[in-house]
Amino acid sequence: MMPRAKLMQQKRDAAAELLSARPLPEGGVWARAARKAAVERLQAMGLPSKRDEYWRYTDPRRLTAADVENADQVDTSDEVPIFEAFDRVKLVFVDGVFDAQASDAPELAGVEICTLAEAARADLHWARDAFGVLEARGQDPVPRPLASLNTAYATEGLLIRVTGKAEKPISLIYRRSAANADAMTHHVIRLEPGAELTLLEDGPVAARYNQVTEIDLAETAVLNHVRAQGRDHARAGATHLFARLGAQAQFKSFTLSANGALTRNEGVIWLDGAEGSAHIAGATVGDGAFHHDDTVFINHAAPRCESRQVFKKVLRHGAVGVFQGKILVDQVAQLTDGYQISQSLLLDEDAQFLAKPELEIYADDVKCSHGSTSGEIDQNQLFYLRARGVSESDAKMLLVLAFLAEALEEIADPDLAEDLRSRLEAWLKRRA
Amino acid sequence: MLEIKNLHCELEEDSEVKILKGLSLTINPGEVHAIMGPNGSGKSTLSYVLSGRDGYAVTEGSASLEGADLLEMEPEERAAAGLFLAFQYPVEIPGVGNMTFLRTAVNAQRKARGQEELSAGAFLKIIRAKAKELQIEPDMLKRPVNVGFSGGEKKRNEILQMAMLEPKMCILDETDSGLDVDAMKLVSDGVNALRDAGRSFLVITHYQRLLNHIKPDVVHIMSEGRIIKTGGPELALEVEENGYTDLLAEANA
């Protein structure tokens, strides 16, 4: 075992090397200050290492290496684009760079949309109260150096402020172009009291990507977030969602992941006001060279809040799934209702699921439960379906979709849930 | 319709455990046969071997449906060929709606037979009518397959599936177990409504009372993996009155 001090030095040296190789982007006063603070955080904590407590199951090297591996693009031209049937404001990124030409006009009643590039040039912007601020808060108690790296260097992203009830969803579409693009995007979403928004994200982003989304929900605000990570097999990415909820705010986040050589999705949520509600869910389908990691931290910091974590992974042919989920209940957070479930369906003996569920509770009157299971297709269910005439492959698909259903149920809008379910069915059919 | 000749089977994982030991049985179109017998005589195994469940190895003999070799077929092919097993313990499938399940099954069989798939609308119309006959609430169609169903609801759901799939050869494996008198009548009425000249039934049961409702043409007594006696409905009454002891002694004599 390497002494702690030596490991820390190695991590810091690695960060220093990375930082020395690239200068900080230009920007106005607020952006420069936020980026400089992020660099300092990164210098202090160093780059992630496989020896870190929350990186034991996932090797971070590909996410921090100087060179980006080429990632072939899956041809999806014969598929109906995801969310196609929904009226929405489409904002397009190509290899992580905002493409105004390909996007709709960023106009929606009750919503201000501004690019990070544009906002960062100004000396003052509303986003300064959130940009890098929630990320910085998210570094304690567990360091998340990739997020600080993002705050320091990201020049692309959107700053979205919602003051009313948005009449249609904002849809972020991430297209790819180059075989080895390295994308960094940083979004800030701020909902004022009583505001409502549905935020959609889809697409493979880039060969490698690092995304941070900071979400600030004032009291009684409602944000529904639905994300579909694209199908490219060889891409590698890390995403962080940092969300702060005021009193009676509601946040629902769902992520569908299929394919991807390496994906690390972190969710950090603070329930800061009484009676807030946060649901974070994921449905993952992995086949072959696939490593997918969901790392979630929910902090109940106020009384009478509710949280749910529902993560389901279907794995085969050597695919690896990781779930690290924690519910931390502060002493003041009486009458907390916390629920966490992580389950995997292993379709063969090569697939692997690693789960680390954690509860840390300092209040004495709470209801918290967590469970984690790994299983195979139920042979009795399979025979029952086949005895009714359903082919073995269709029967397995029905059972796989049934397994994922609990996660899909976390999508607030049933039409969106059905869109993703039918998409999943088509993907599974293709690979059956 | 169904022809079973000298069928022998053992457990796949333990060939020492022989379950069927030379069972022969012929069921003609339109006939209702009952198989009775003590626990462990191999009645349920017979239903599983015929429907193609894993875990059993057929070592000798044959089983055919309208001349086609059942034992060579996958379970879904047997279903498409017209075989239906009403399970003794219907399986719960969380996350799959009952209606979705039934429509998938009906259309899979239609497709296998080269028929056109039923549209959602046409399917809905048929299932609503059949569900009503079996006093199945619309709510039960929306719920996940058999999840939270009572014993009676599960068995009625089996009969609903049978009615929707319109098989030629129906095997009812202890469909009466776990049913009260009213539920048994409801299920039996459902079965009787399906009786016709082109459809045959094999009713596996411990008790004669089910046979008061579903009147068999032929009754077989099964013991230790074979049919030991065959007769008319009076044989079932004899079992009800005297138990199996005399019949078994007679067979062993």
Image: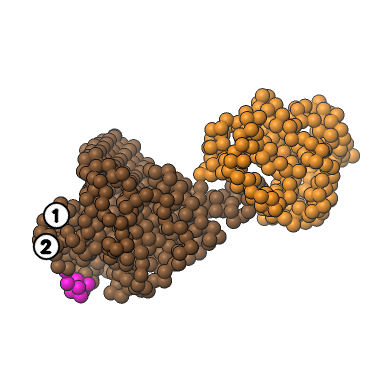
Chain colours: A brown, B orange
Q: Is B73 above or below relative to A109?
A: below
Which residue is painted at 20% across and 53% down in the image? A134
Quarter of the figure with the C terminus of chain B:
top right
**Residue toward you, B247 or B155:** B155
| Label pair 2/1, CB-CB below 8 angstroms | yes
| Whole-percent x, y for residue B48 in the image | 70, 47
**Residue toward you, A328 or B131:** B131
Q: Is residue A21 visible?
A: yes
Measured in 3D between alpha carbons, the distance from the residue under mark 2 to the one under mark 1, in whole angstroms, is: 10 Å
- Number of labels in the image equals 2
Q: Which residues are magenta?
A: A18-24
Residue position marked by numbered label 1 in the rendering: A125
| Whole-percent x, y for residue B169 in the image | 76, 43
Which residue is painted at 74% across and 35% down in the image? B194
Residue position marked by numbered label 2 in the rendering: A28
| Whole-percent x, y for residue A405 in the image | 47, 47
Whether A23 is among the magenta residues is: yes
Marked residue nearer the N-terminal end (2 or 1): 2
**Residue toward you, A36 or A96:** A96
